[in-house]
Image (tube, grey):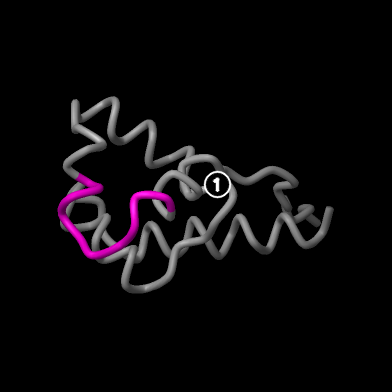
């Protein structure tokens, strides 16, 4: 019988976003200006203080090329793991 692995650590989408921005040499100012979403919201996401929803995940897909479902699943998993701590 094999044991199911249950991770106890998850990466906040903001941390992933920083990595994507850096690896693809994107500019944060372009993210801030490409949508109607407030810059303060994006900064809170980057700092791990706010969450993504369908609208902002779509903005990130348009900005980074990373599919919105990846952003949403990262948020969902982060939320699940955070609840158990």
> Which of 69 and 31 lies nearest the eye of the viewer?
31
Instruction: Give neighbour class at mark 1: few <14, some 14-19, many 20+ (Cα, 10 Å).
Output: many
Q: Reply yes or no: does residue 33 show up in magenta.
A: yes
Find the magenta span and give its range: 31-40
Left or right of 53: which side holds 63? left
> What residue is drawn where x is 21% and y is 38%?
29
| Residue 24 percent location from the top left of the image | 20, 30
Q: Secondary structure at mark 1?
A: loop
Above or below, 7 relative to 19: below
Q: Is residue 61 left or right of residue 50?
A: left
Identify whether 25 is placed above or below 82: above
Percent coordinates x, y for residue 76 in the rendering:
55, 65
Q: Quadrant of residue 34?
A: bottom left
Of all residues, the one furthest to the bottom in this rendering is 54
Residue indicated by mark 1: 12
Q: Quadrant of residue 27?
A: top left
Considering depth in this image, is 34 or 22 the residue closer to the camera? 34
Percent x, y for residue 52?
45, 63
The picture places residue 17, in percent across and down from the top left corner, at: 38, 41
């Amino acid at each position: 019988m094999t044991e199911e692995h249950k991770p106890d650590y998850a990466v906040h989408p903001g941390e992933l976003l920083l990595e994507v921005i850096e690896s693809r040499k994107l500019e944060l100012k372009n993210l801030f200006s490409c949508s109607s979403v407030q810059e303060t919201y994006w900064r809170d996401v980057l700092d791990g203080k706010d969450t993504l929803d369908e609208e902002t995940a779509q903005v990130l897909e348009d900005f980074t090329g990373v599919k919105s479902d990846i952003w949403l699943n990262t948020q969902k998993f982060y939320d699940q793991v955070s609840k158990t701590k």
